[in-house]
Amino acid sequence: ATLLREHRGDGHNAALVVHGVGGTEAHVLFAVSLGMRAEEFGRIHHLGKAQLAAVVDGLRGRGLVDAGGGFTDAGRETRQRIEALTDELAAPAYDVLSADELDELIAGLEPVATAVEAVDY
């Protein structure tokens, strides 16, 4: 599971780079996807208000975030493209598994997925 997670994470980082999204920007966009303001998101709330405001302003200037701090249509589309590319890059690690191996993997990971879904961000 850790190897697959890291493989997917590497692909996600590559997808972010392809779409010109840096690390702090990625966290801000994730916060937006959760309906949160950047200042409220745990992974970046410790950054200075001016720094976070500059990142949000940059995303707004690129047309990804609107004046209210939510996604624009372009922002939603960019996020969808990033996630689709991440899925595409992750797929080969699963393509080598037989149907039975994939079923076993899913069954083994279901309790983990349930626990993760229960976390309140």
Image (cartoon, rainbow, N blue to C red):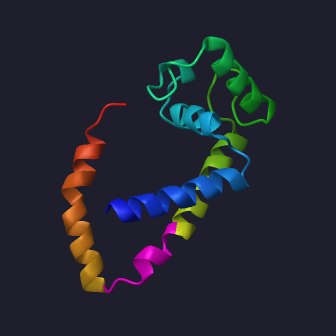
Q: Is residue 108 located in the magenta-colored stretch of the structure? A: no
Residue 84's quadrant in the figure?
bottom right
> Could you say which is closer to the camera, residue 34 or residue 52?
52
Residue at the far top: name it: 49
Is residue 81 visible from the viewing direction of this image?
no
> Could you say which is closer to the camera, residue 61 or residue 18?
18
The spot of residue 70 in percent (x, y) is: 62, 29
Q: Is residue 94 located in the magenta-colored stretch of the structure? A: yes
Which residue is pictured at 80% across the width and 30% down the height? 61
Which residue is pictured at 44% across the width and 75% down the height? 93
Residue 12's quadrant in the figure?
bottom right
Q: Which segment did they paint magenta?
A: 90-98
Quarter of the C terminus within the rendering: top left
Taking the image as shown, residue 64 lies to the left or right of residue 112, namely right
User: As displayed, is residue 20 above or below residue 15?
Assistant: above
Is residue 27 visible from the viewing direction of this image?
yes
Residue at the far right: name it: 61
The spot of residue 3 in percent (x, y) is: 38, 64
